[in-house]
C-alpha cells in the first residue's frame, strides 16, 4: 500500500492522462472493497457461501458501473489526493449518495424484471441494510484512502539537511491555518511549527492540525525562548504596524528571524504559500495604513495629458512615474541627469506600461537652453519637479552646487513651465526647509519661496509638497544600515536622541499626486508623516530583524552630529497658516507674503557667486533670504554625543536615557 501511495504522490500534470486512468482503476477497487465490507459487516465476515457467490459477485458489476459513472460526472477522478480538503470530501459524500441511490434503483428494477421472467430469486440472501452499509463504507473507504495519501505526504517527508527550523506562527486565524497547511505540504520538512500565538481568548489551548495555540502574542519572547524557536512567522493579514514594532522590540536579543506574508491586505481567503514568505522589513514596522486617494480626481487631471517628471530616475521621481502611469497619461516625459537611472526606469515602464508613450531626456535642470527646448518640444501639461541635491552633509561641503541645482535648477524648470503654459507645476520639497539648519534645507526653502511668488495671475498653478524622510530612498538611513549590517557592523548612529519622520516611497508619491491635482497657486502641502521615529530605535529594530543582537552581535557606535543636521525635524513654520484639506493626510500652508523683488535679486546674486564665493559667504547670503536659517545649530540645550561613543558610553553621556537592551543588526544613520 505504501508503494501505491508513493506512486500516486509522484504523479503530476505531465502524466494527467495516465493519472486519470489509474484513479478510475483505484476507485473501482475501493468501491469493490466498500461493497464487500458492507456484506461482511452484516454477516460478521462469516458464511461466505451464503452471500459472496450468490449475491456479492452478481451485484459487483452493477455497483461499479453506477458509482464509476457518478464519480466521473462529479469529476472526482481529477482531484489531486495530496491536496485533499473538506470540499473534496464533501464531493465524495455527494458521489456516495447518488451512487447508492442508483444502486437502490438498479437493484429493485433488476429484481422486478427477474420476477416476471424467471422463477428463481435473483439476489438471494440480500439484506436491505446493505444499501446503508455500502453508502457508509464508500464514504469511509474513498475518503480514507485520500486522507492517507495526504498524511503520507505530510508525515513521511524527508527532513531538510541540518534538521527542521523551529518556528512560531503569529496569528491562529485563517491565514495562520493556511500557512501551516502549506508548511505541512512541503516536499522536504524544512520547518517544524511548535505552536501558534494569538490574542483571541477563545483560541487559547485549542489545536489546529495538531499544533497548539500556546498563548497571547505578548508572550512571544518567553515562548520563543522556552521552545528554542528560530523563526517567527507573522500571519496576521491586518496586523497594525505599531503592534508589529512592539513584537520586534520584545524580541530584541533573541536572535529570532522574522518572516511575513507579502501584501497581507491582498491575501484572499487565506490562500498563501510558503514560497511567498519574505523577511519582515523595516517598512512593515514604520509603514501606515494604505493611502486613500481620490482616484477619480487624479485620473481627471492626468488621463490623456502629457506629464513631465524631473529627476525621473531617482527614488521619488521613479515612483511618481510608476504612479502616474496607472492613470493613463497621453505621454510620460522623463528628465534625468543620470543616464543609467533613466535607462532603468524607462525599461521598467516599457515592461509594466507598454501602451503609454514615453520620451527620455538626459538633461541637467540647470541647463536653461536644454530645459527650454524640452518644454517647447514636448508641451507638457503637468510637471512634477523631483530633481534636487538632497544629501545634507554633502551639500554642506558643496554649498555652491546646492544653490545652483536646488535654487537655480528649480528656477529654470519653473520659468520654462510658465513660458510654455503648463497647467500645473508641483515641486517636491522637504521638512528640512522648515526653520532650516542645513544648506540643503535652506536652498529648498528659497526654491519654495520662488515658485510661491512666481506667476501670480498666470495660467500655470505652482504648488509645493513637503514631506520627511522616505524609507529606502537613495542615500537614506535604511539602505546604509542594511549595508552595515551585512558587513557585520559596526552600525553608526550620529546621536541617540535624533528623531526623524518616515514614510514609504509609494505612500509619499501617491500623496504627491493627490496634492498636485487639488492644489491652488502658492499652496505648500504638508503630508501627514505620523509619529517621529528615534534613529537609535530604528537601528535596533533593523538589527533585530536581521537576526542579531544590538550591542552584542553587532555594535552600535555614536559618531556625533554632522554639519547641517538637526536633532528633530519640524513640519510647520512661523508665519504660515496651516489649514486642513479634504484629504485627511494632507494639510496646506497658505502663501506667506514675501518681498518678490528681494527674492529675485537675492537668487540672482547667489547664482552669480555660487562658483566664486566660499561656503561661509554663501551661507550668509542664504540667511539674508531666509531669516530663520540657522547654520549648524542645535536645538536649545541639546548637545551632541561625542564621536566614537559606544552604546554604553552614550547612555551615560545622555543621562541613561537609553535602555540597556540589545539588538540584532548593525545600523548607521544617514538622513534622507
Image (tube, rainbow, N blue to C red):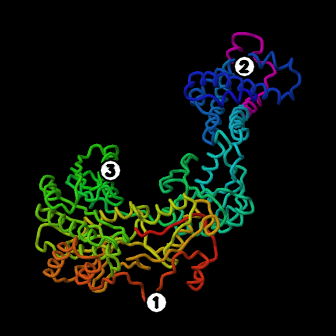
Point 23% across, 84% down: residue: 624
Magenta highlight range: 112-137
The residue at 18%/79% (across/down) is 602
* Residue at image point 27% right, 60% down: 298
Q: Which mark is residue 60?
A: 2
Against 657, residue 1 (above or below) is: above
Residue 593 tag number: none
Mark closest to the chain's N terminus, 2 or 3: 2
Tag on residue 340?
3
Label 1 vs label 2, nearer the camera: 1
Binning the other alpha carbons within 10 Å of mark 1 as few (below 14), some (14 to 19) or many (20 upward) gives few
Q: Is residue 585 visible?
A: no
Q: Indicate which disc, 1 or 2, sits on the residue closer to the N terminus.
A: 2
| Residue 412: percent from left, percent from top | 17, 65
The residue carrying mark 1 is 637
Q: Are marks 2 and 3 in contact (CB under 8 Å)?
A: no
The answer to whether residue 23 is above or below residue 136 is above
Is residue 478 something that shows in the picture? Answer: yes
Q: Quadrant of the C terminus?
A: bottom left
Q: Is 365 one of the magenta-colored residues?
A: no
* Residues at marks 1 and 3 touching, judged by CB atoms closer than 8 Å: no
When asked about the image quadrant of residue 337, the answer is bottom left
Left or right of 485, for residue 163: right
**Does residue 663 sit above or below 208 in this rendering?**
below
Relative horizontal placement of residue 128, taking residue 66 as reference (left or right): right
Q: Is residue 30 above or below residue 479?
A: above
Q: Residues within 10 Å of mark 3 (few under 14, many from 20)?
A: few
> Residue 509's x, y, as percent?
34, 62
Quadrant assignment for the N terminus: top right
Residue 591 screen position, x and y as percent: 22, 79
> Quick check: 148 left or right of 634?
right
Label 2, secondary structure: give it: helix
Amino acid at each position: 500500500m505504501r508503494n501505491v501511495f508513493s506512486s500516486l504522490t509522484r504523479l503530476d500534470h505531465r502524466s494527467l492522462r495516465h493519472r486519470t486512468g489509474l484513479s478510475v482503476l483505484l476507485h473501482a477497487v475501493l468501491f469493490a472493497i466498500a461493497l464487500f465490507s458492507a456484506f461482511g459487516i452484516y454477516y460478521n465476515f462469516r458464511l461466505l457461501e451464503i452471500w459472496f457467490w450468490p449475491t456479492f459477485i452478481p451485484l459487483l458489476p452493477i455497483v461499479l458501473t453506477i458509482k464509476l459513472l457518478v464519480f466521473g460526472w462529479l469529476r472526482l477522478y481529477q482531484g489531486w489526493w495530496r491536496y485533499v480538503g473538506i470540499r473534496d470530501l464533501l464531493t465524495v459524500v455527494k458521489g456516495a449518495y447518488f451512487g447508492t441511490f442508483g444502486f437502490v434503483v438498479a437493484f429493485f428494477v433488476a429484481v422486478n424484471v427477474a420476477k416476471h421472467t424467471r422463477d428463481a430469486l435473483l439476489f438471494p440472501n440480500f439484506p436491505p441494510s446493505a444499501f446503508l452499509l455500502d453508502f457508509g463504507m464508500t464514504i469511509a473507504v474513498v475518503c480514507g484512502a485520500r486522507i492517507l495519501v495526504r498524511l503520507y505526504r505530510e508525515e513521511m517527508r524527508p527532513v531538510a539537511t541540518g534538521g527542521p527550523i523551529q518556528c512560531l506562527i503569529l496569528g491562529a486565524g485563517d491565514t495562520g491555518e493556511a500557512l501551516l497547511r502549506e508548511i505541512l505540504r512541503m516536499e522536504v520538512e524544512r520547518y517544524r511549527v511548535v505552536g501558534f500565538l494569538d490574542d483571541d481568548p477563545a483560541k487559547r489551548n485549542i489545536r489546529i492540525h495538531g499544533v497548539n495555540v500556546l498563548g497571547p502574542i505578548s508572550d512571544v519572547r518567553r515562548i520563543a525562548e522556552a521552545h528554542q524557536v528560530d523563526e517567527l512567522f507573522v500571519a496576521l493579514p491586518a496586523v497594525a504596524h505599531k503592534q508589529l514594532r512592539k513584537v520586534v522590540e520584545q524580541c530584541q536579543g533573541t536572535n529570532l528571524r522574522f518572516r511575513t506574508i507579502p501584501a497581507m491586505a491582498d491575501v484572499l481567503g487565506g490562500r498563501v504559500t510558503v514560497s511567498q514568505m519574505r523577511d519582515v522589513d523595516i517598512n512593515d514596522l514604520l509603514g501606515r495604513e494604505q493611502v486613500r486617494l481620490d482616484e477619480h480626481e487624479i485620473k481627471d487631471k492626468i488621463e490623456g495629458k502629457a506629464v513631465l517628471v524631473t529627476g525621473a530616475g531617482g527614488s521619488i521621481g521613479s515612483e511618481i512615474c510608476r504612479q502616474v502611469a496607472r492613470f493613463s497619461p497621453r505621454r510620460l516625459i522623463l528628465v534625468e541627469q543620470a543616464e543609467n537611472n533613466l535607462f532603468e526606469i524607462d525599461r521598467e515602464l516599457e515592461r509594466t506600461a507598454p501602451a503609454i508613450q514615453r520620451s527620455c531626456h538626459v538633461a541637467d535642470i540647470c541647463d536653461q537652453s536644454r530645459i527650454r527646448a524640452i518644454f517647447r518640444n514636448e508641451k507638457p501639461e503637468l510637471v512634477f519637479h523631483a530633481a534636487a541635491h538632497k544629501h545634507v552633509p554633502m551639500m554642506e561641503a558643496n554649498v555652491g552646487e546646492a544653490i545652483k541645482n536646488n535654487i537655480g535648477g528649480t528656477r529654470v524648470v519653473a520659468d520654462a513651465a510658465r513660458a510654455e503654459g503648463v497647467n500645473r507645476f508641483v515641486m517636491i520639497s522637504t521638512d528640512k526647509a522648515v526653520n532650516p539648519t542645513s544648506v540643503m534645507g535652506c536652498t529648498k526653502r528659497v526654491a519654495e519661496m520662488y515658485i510661491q511668488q512666481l506667476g501670480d495671475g498666470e495660467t500655470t498653478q505652482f504648488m509645493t509638497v513637503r514631506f520627511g524622510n522616505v524609507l529606502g530612498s537613495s542615500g537614506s538611513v535604511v539602505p546604509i544600515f542594511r549595508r552595515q549590517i551585512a558587513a557585520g557592523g559596526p552600525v553608526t548612529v550620529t546621536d541617540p536622541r535624533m528623531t526623524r519622520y518616515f514614510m514609504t516611497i509609494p505612500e509619499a508619491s501617491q500623496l504627491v499626486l493627490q496634492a498636485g491635482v487639488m492644489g491652488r497657486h502658492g499652496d505648500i502641502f504638508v503630508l501627514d508623516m505620523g509619529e517621529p521615529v528615534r534613529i537609535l530605535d530604528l537601528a535596533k529594530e533593523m538589527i533585530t530583524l536581521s537576526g542579531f543582537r544590538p550591542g552584542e552581535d553587532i555594535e552600535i557606535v555614536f559618531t556625533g552630529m554632522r554639519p547641517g543636521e538637526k536633532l528633530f525635524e519640524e513640519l510647520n513654520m512661523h508665519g504660515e497658516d496651516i489649514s486642513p484639506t479634504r484629504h485627511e493626510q494632507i494639510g496646506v500652508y497658505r502663501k506667506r507674503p514675501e518681498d518678490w523683488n528681494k527674492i529675485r535679486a537675492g537668487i540672482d546674486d547667489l547664482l552669480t557667486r555660487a562658483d566664486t564665493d566660499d561656503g561661509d559667504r554663501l551661507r550668509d547670503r542664504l540667511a539674508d533670504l531666509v531669516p530663520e536659517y540657522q547654520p549648524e545649530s542645535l536645538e536649545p540645550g541639546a548637545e551632541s554625543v561625542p564621536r566614537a561613543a559606544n552604546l554604553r558610553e552614550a547612555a551615560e553621556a545622555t543621562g541613561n536615557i537609553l535602555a540597556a537592551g540589545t539588538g540584532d543588526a548593525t545600523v548607521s544613520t544617514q538622513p534622507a
